[in-house]
Image (spheres, rainbow, N blue to C red):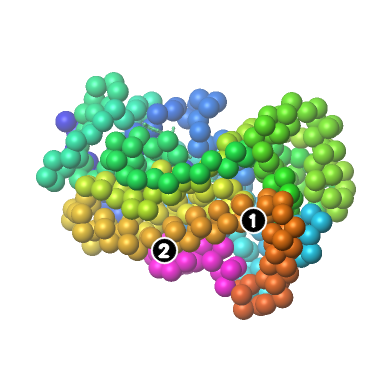
Amino acid sequence: MTDFDAIIVGGGLVGASLAVGLAWRGQRVAVIEAVERSADHQPSYDDRTLVINAASLNILDNLGLLPEDLTRKPIRHIHISRAGGLGHLELNAADYEQDQFGAVIVARELGNVLLEAMANRPGIQSFCPARLQGFKVESDRVEITLEDGHSLSAALLVGADGNHSRVRELAGLACQKHDYRQSAMIFNVQPQHAPAHTAWERFTTQGPLALLPQSEGRLGVVWIEQSERIEHALNWSDQALCERLKTRFGGSLGDFSNPGRRSHYPLVCQRTPWPVADRLVVIGNAANAVHPVSAQGFNLGLRDVGGLIDALEETADPGDPDVLNDYARARQADQESTVRYTDTLARAFTNPSLVASLASGLGLAAHAGIPGLSRRLVRSAMGFREPVCTLARQPRVST
Ligand SMILES: Cc1cc2nc3c(=O)[nH]c(=O)nc-3n(C[C@H](O)[C@H](O)[C@H](O)COP(=O)(O)OP(=O)(O)OC[C@H]3O[C@@H](n4cnc5c(N)ncnc54)[C@H](O)[C@@H]3O)c2cc1C
């Protein structure tokens, strides 16, 4: 049986980032991934436009995962508005002594970088396509079996296997779930004119809408609405889609044209209050899955990665229960508040009652009008939540 320091089940965005980070710290890592990279349905590395916040950019940079040729569009201005509401909020990075709030990167392109890093860095062995079947915990090892009959062992088992985590399920970790009965439809589109380096978030009673800068002046659209309405929207003609986008967003960017391929995702909230068990931890979406309204899911997962790398820094045994419990305690406040904040936002802005809509509008206006509050929110939205992991503190501390 082949033995490792850590076995990571799930080689998606979060699992692959952790593999690179652990290998960088000299650990021997196995990555078990169910879906081949070349498969059209690879669930992690698709056409999603990801807003990667400043703390996450630091983490990726420090892991050598932001090569020059990876296309990233900086976000220097954020425009938040509410259809028919009272408030709107404009944030400029320069007002917070920042060059950018974060950047937009297409998940598929980041996936290419991650896969290349996993293939080339010593210490990482990939098993793909391969699926976890089960595991058993011995005193100082976890032994796992794959569906093809292979067995592997390690000091630590990490579940980075997404929303329907088999690792979480087999470990019996309690997970609270909420189905929003909403879906996100994503596509990119050409606006008639759009200021550079700007991201727009618009809240409507049907659901939020985000427009994010992409290459060649195009915008990535994240359109969120009740799932049955999204089912219809997937079948609209391109022209109808562009017209309805303009109706929903407003006319400030002119007409939209030439939309790309549409994909959709059902939206859930999941919270695993205590993500560790005997020689085991779940991270990323396997632990906490959030509504994309505030673009926090992968960012939260990357902070799990940074937190785990810090926790394992001083230990000879990566599966040491005390170390894992320390990790869970250190990550608890960030995980809890990110899930709660995102869930509140997702529910508040779609509440049709007048009172809630008034409160939401005033809330935005209040954020814009109280610089101290706004500054705190901005720093937290940029991913700098205490305790800030070592990799997030500044770009390129060491590699
Ligand atoms: C529309 C949309 C927009 C988003 N925008 C943003 C954004 O702007 N910013 C942001 O930070 N986040 C965003 N997110 C969230 C982000 O995409 C997720 O948080 C992130 O993809 C989670 O990564 P993960 O690796 O934890 O899980 P996943 O991406 O689900 O990856 C899990 C991996 O595990 C594999 N797997 C599953 N089961 C097994 C098994 N039994 N054995 C082996 N392998 C297995 C899967 O094949 C997959 O590759 C968005 C999400 C959506 C839906």
Left/right of residue 353 with respect to residue 282 in the rendered view: right
Residue 311 in magenta stretch: no
Quadrant assignment, res 391? bottom left
Near-viewer residue (170 or 75): 170
- The span picked out in magenta is 376-397
Q: Which residue is mark 2?
A: 333
Amino acid type, residue under disc 2 in the picture:
Ala
Report the residue at 58% width, 68% height from top.
377
Residue 384 in magenta stretch: yes
Whether residue 138 is visible here, answered yes or no, is yes
Residue 375 higher or lower than 77, as above or below: below
Q: Residue furthest top?
A: 148
Report the residue at 13% width, 46% height from top.
140
Considering the image in quadrants, where does the C terminus appear?
A: bottom left
Residue 252, label in figure: none
Near-viewer residue (321 or 2): 321
Residue 92 higher or lower than 139, as above or below: below
Residue 143 higher or lower than 64, as above or below: above
Quadrant assignment, res 388? bottom left
Mark 2 crowd level (few <14, some 14–19, many ≥20, 10 Å Cα): some
Near-viewer residue (127 or 320): 320
Q: Nearer the viewer, mark 2 or mark 1?
A: 1
